[in-house]
Image (spheres, rainbow, N blue to C red):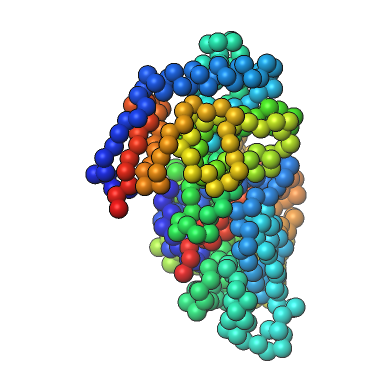
Amino acid sequence: MDRHSPETRIISAEKMAELIQDLAERIVRENPDLTDVILVGIRSRGAHLAGRIAGKVREMTKVLLPVGILDISLYRDDLRSRIDQPELIRTEIPGPVEDRNIILVDDVLFTGRTIRAALDGIMDLGRARKIQLAVLVDRGHRELPIRANYTGQYVPTSLEQTIRVRFSEDGEEDGVILRELAR
Amino acid sequence: MAWGKRKDLLGIEDLSREEIEAILDTAESFKDVSLRKIKKVPTLRGVTVVNFFLEPSTRTRTSFELAGKRLSADVINISASSSSILKGESLKDTAWNIEAMNADILIVRHRAAGVAHFLSGMLDCSVINAGDGAHEHPTQALLDLFSIRERKQKIDGLTVAIVGDIAHSRVARSNIFALRKLGALVRIAGPGTMIPLGVEAMDVQVCRSLDEAIDGADVIMMLRIQRERQEKSLFPSVREYARFFGLTRQRLQGAKKDLLIMHPGPINRGVEIAPDVADGPYSIILDQVTNGVAVRMATLYLYSGAKR
């Protein structure tokens, strides 16, 4: 990516906090029984978001949802066309997924291929009772029939743009950044 | 991750410390896969892996086969006794024929040192050395390091004693390279006929007795006495060898509480290692076997990425 390409902060830190609060509220509303829920963040920014949502849910309900991290590298469909092998991060899910209500969490929903890989990854760990999807931003351009149960905000984009969610966990200011790809 | 896209894994000697650590880190993720109920990931679907073993092996061949299968690769095995090598086909021709069937990764074991290098130069597919003569056995050293690191959380600063037939052991050579690169101190011990001349150049400490080598050691690696080489009479008798260089419980009386005892297998019980030591509290011999699959999965994963 060209580092000189113009960068627009389309969602501020305050707005991002509101969206996360909103996601947490809807998750609480739609899942009356929180005892069998596991939030599973797709590494690495999905894991940050899952942690944030868990924090909000705890403020609201005093329930501490378990948070797991899923690395989908082994399930990617573009492994053979890449030049290098992606670095693996350990998948860490607290407890068995068997019969649990899994909420996958990712920062951006784009082609849907990451989510397809994540679904396969979860299913190999056991038969969950239910799998849902929560994302902060849906930027469109789906290549697979996949849709989120909980979406923070729809952001219409073109394929000449990139979307990047920044988290203070990575030492950056919270927010969503839109960039034009250099031609 | 310091992974510099290599085509072949021929020996530890060529690898940097960072590359060794990258393989070990990757293996941790794969160890998790082996512990799951569904021990399979689709990562290498459509990749063809050929196990080309021209020397006997159970552990290494099975380990590579399982590693490939757990990654969803197609794995086939070719051994000397079942191949046309018996009909006089040359190594070169056999290798070219295997590659002509679009193999992606060729894992080779051969009694002659340098065979993996030779094949890597003539083939486009990735070549992984699974043991070439007395030269190297890189994945064995990697799995040994992984097993040590898993127990000790580090390699740096540990004292590791390697005992036995150092001169004929590719396992010892690969381990010495790997341990030194990662900052361990290496001591070696064995009958004088089994200590290679000039081994000090590998930056190891040569000990005159087993007791000297294992005194205060964090890890003891026992090597297999290669009884098939006995006709060369490198030592007078198996009994005498066991008396001087066999690891027994008495010899371990002053051992550290967290000592690790390792052996690459197959073990000769009662020769280089007493049965109660091999099965005893310090032994991680079977962990090595378990970890071997994870390390070989990591190797196949990383080396399958390097396309011509």
Give coordinates of residue A59: x percent, y percent.
53, 11
**In this view, which residue lies farthest toward the bottom?**
B88
Can residue B64 be seen in the rendering of this structure? no
Residue at horizontal 60 percent and vertical 43 percent from the top: A145
Residue at horizontal 46 percent and vertical 31 percent from the top: A154
Q: Is residue B44 above or below residue B215?
A: below
Give coordinates of residue A10: x percent, y percent.
35, 30
Residue at horizontal 24 percent and vertical 44 percent from the top: A4
Foreground residue, A137 or A69? A137
Give residue B61's quadrant in the image. Answer: bottom right
Give coordinates of residue B65: x percent, y percent.
68, 61
Foreground residue, B111 or B255? B111
Foreground residue, B115 or B197? B115
Q: Is residue B158 above or below residue B92?
A: above
Give residue B75's quadrant in the image. Answer: bottom right
**In this view, which residue lies farthest toward the left?**
A4
Can residue B184 be seen in the rendering of this structure? yes
Q: Is residue B19 above or below residue A92?
A: below
Q: Count all numbered tags in the image, as a single digit.
A: 0
**Is A91 displayed left or right of B278 in the figure?**
left
**Is A141 displayed left or right of A158 in the figure?**
right
Residue at horizontal 51 percent and vertical 64 percent from the top: B9
**Is A150 displayed left or right of B229 in the figure?**
left
Give coordinates of residue B254: x percent, y percent.
60, 38
Q: Is residue B31 above or below residue B73?
A: above
